[in-house]
Amino acid sequence: MSSESIAPARIEICRFPAGKRIAVTTSFDDGHTFDRRVVDAFNAWGLKGTFNLNSGKLQRTGKPAIESGDRTYLDASEVAGLYRGHEVAIHSVTHPWLERLDGSQIATEVLDDRKALEDLVGYPVRGMAYPYGSFGPKVIETLRGLGIVYSRTCENLPNCFPPAEPLAWATTAHQYASNPSVPERFAQLHATRHYSGVFYVWGHAFEFHDKKDWAGIERIYKPLSGHADVWYCTNIELFDYEEARRRVQIAANRKTAFNPSALPVTLHVDGKLLDLPAGKLVALV
Ligand SMILES: [Zn+2]
């Protein structure tokens, strides 16, 4: 590159990989056999889920749990296979109200769940959802030293990402939200040409059972799937990409960009998408 090369006028670091406009992510709690129906549907439609599990409630028979027609916990032996391609995350060992516990019990509930789930899935488990949505300053302070990247609450916010406090992360909506419903709300945002953001839905698979509304999986979630301008990701993938994009170094003369992380990041260079591969220095002129 010569010193006379003309640098691009503007370089943007895309919010999501491949310059996608919207990220759709979901979160399901408790790990009952009902999750199988959600996973099957999501696999068929290309949606991603984060599944928050209580390791102390999982069955330990070594065989897939038998559906009882009511809430039955999965067997530990089926966790890795069932959730492959999705994210397994912490929901504490025994599902207590964390806010009512002292620091050492909070730490034990979270760290023991983390270790037990890691033994099952074979990767670092760094995400979490609060049982009963119960958290407070003491819970957050305790979690800080335990390697938890984010913890989901039961609160809703129109702009939920990136959160000011990742250990008090709100969602966009509960899956049975009304006025607007989840598919209505998604359709409105998706139809807004310049809208860009994260669409984050949470719930429990047992709600479809309790409401006798198994058709709800398709009615609520299928409309979110299959859009070329949407990134379908797990919760932790959102945070990992966000961290990678924050680490990108753009030269002040706008002639080079360096991606020091292990994830590719997408740039928008004078209106054109450009892949900035992991660990690479790229010339922009
Ligand atoms: Zn729960």
Image (cartoon, helix red, strand yellow):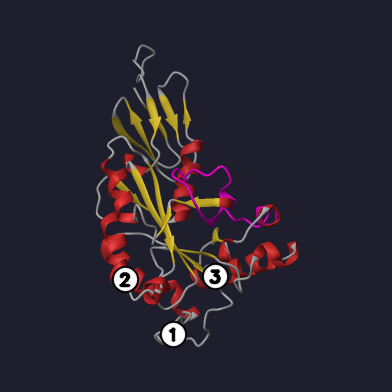
Q: Earlier in the sequence, mark 2 or mark 3?
A: 2
| Amino acid tagged 3 | Leu
Could you tell me which residue is drawn at 41 percent across and 21 percent down? 254
Q: For the residue carrying disc 1, how many other residues have a C-alpha within 10 Å: few (<14), some (14-19), or many (20+)?
A: some
Q: Bounds of the magenta span?
A: 141-167
Secondary structure beneath dot 1 equals: loop
Q: Of the residues under marks 3 and 1, which one precedes in the sequence?
A: 1
- Indicate yes or no whether the magenta region holds residue 143: yes
Instruction: Residue type at mark 2: give it.
Output: Asp
Residue 7 forms part of the magenta stretch: no
* Image coordinates for residue 25, horizontal then vertical, percent: 40, 54
Residue, disc 1: 65
Q: CA distance from mark 1 to mark 2?
A: 16 Å
**Residue 266 against residue 87 in the figure, above or below:** above
Secondary structure beneath label 3? helix
Q: Is residue 280 left or right of residue 226?
A: right
**Marked residue nearer the N-terminal end (1 or 2):** 2
The residue shown at (30%, 55%) is 183
For this view, does 25 lie left or right of residue 271?
right
Q: Which mark is residue 117?
A: 3
**Res 56 quadrant in image:** bottom right
How far apart are labels 3 and 1 at the CA level?
17 Å
Up-down: is 92 above or below 4? below
x then y, percent, for residue 196: 36, 39
**Residue denoted by label 2:** 40
